[in-house]
Image: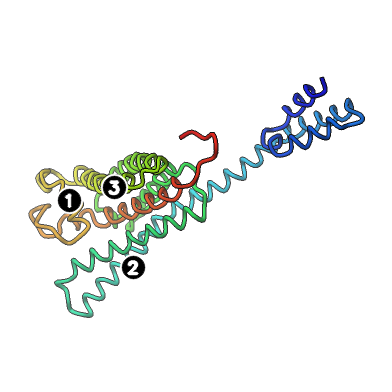
Amino acid sequence: MRARLIRTVLALYPAAIRERYGDEIAELLAASATPARDLADTARCALRDRLTHRVETMTVAQARTTAVTVIKLVVAPFTFGVLLLALLTTAGLLADVTGAHEAAPYGYTLAVALAAASMWWFGRWRARTERIVAAVVVVPAALALGVAGINAMPYFGEVLGEVRAGSLAAVACWAIGAAALGWAVSVLLRHGRRAAAWLSSGVGALLLLDAVTAVYVFTALSPERAPRHNAPLWYLSSMSWWDPGLVDDGYRQLADSIKMLPPMLTMCTVFLLAVLGVTASRPRPAGSAV
């Protein structure tokens, strides 16, 4: 009879307290010389713990930490943009100083590659130092919000494309596609299929970035200016200075229109995959859903 009462009283405690102190409380109650009074006192304490929302207080603290992490992720694209601009400016200055203007396309491509590579390191570092809840959804959504914020800024937003509506459409499509890609990669990693995960991430990232570049061009440029049969080449062209006249039959007309949007989304994609490479490889708590 006493054992049943003890279990009933323990059930009044919030789960977190019950799991941590339940066995100890049960032993004390079982050995009590005044069981009725101690059971009543314990029940009162259990109800007080529930009514004072101790578990809810922990949840608020966790929510506050998560909110700070999300804010950092939203701000991250601004940092990405500063890094990219710095590298591109450096490449341009080197071309001017050395007089090797014919090598400028290679300098541009190298600067973009260095910026993207740095995102791999930065993403893995961020995932190791901060726990990101639901990274598959939170990271693409927060990064897309940050890029959209840049796009909305007066004057400076034009660095992501001369047609803001096109940039916004591309960013929205990127967020959806990146979440889907991240989910697929995470599932493969959790099942131990690392080779398939990284192959899927590489191919999927290229297809995603090619698609969102096409979304921008479809939205911003008419078929007369940008013939649709050139769509598979748009992303490659925008990431380099290779341009055989894809827009208006003119050299670098596509880059002049789309500007830094593809490199920015490339950096965001690499950052996302780096984060998921860490978070999806962590052991999952026992009993959690696969």
Question: Disc 1 marks which residue?
Answer: 234
Occupied quadrant, residue 254 = bottom left
47 vs 197, left or right, is right
82 vs 15, left or right, is left
- Along the line of sight, which residue is nearer the eye, 56 or 190? 190
Task: Determine the secondary structure under disc 3.
Answer: helix
Whole-number angstrom distance, CA of label 2 to CA of label 3: 31 Å
Measured as percent of width and height from the top left, residue 227 is found at 10, 45
The reply to whether discs 2 and 1 touch (Cβ–Cβ < 8 Å) is no
Whole-number angstrom distance, CA of label 2 to CA of label 1: 24 Å
Q: Who's the residue at 23% across and 65% down the image?
A: 108
Q: Who's the residue at 77% across and 22% down the image?
A: 4
Question: Disc 2 marks which residue?
Answer: 86
Instruction: Give whichever of discs 1 and 3 has the lower sequence position.
Output: 3
Vertical position of residue 47 compared to residue 113: above or below: above
Given the image, on which type of amino acid does mark 2 rest? Ala
Task: Determine the secondary structure under disc 1.
Answer: helix
Measured as percent of width and height from the top left, residue 106 is found at 20, 67
Mark 2 vs mark 3, foreground winner is 3
Q: Furthest-left residue in view?
A: 249
Given the image, on which type of amino acid does mark 1 rest? Trp
Task: Determine the secondary structure under disc 2.
Answer: helix
Instruction: Give whichever of discs 2 and 3 has the lower sequence position.
Output: 2
- Along the line of sight, which residue is nearer the eye, 153 or 100? 100
* Quarter of the image with the C terminus in it: top left
The reply to whether discs 2 and 3 touch (Cβ–Cβ < 8 Å) is no
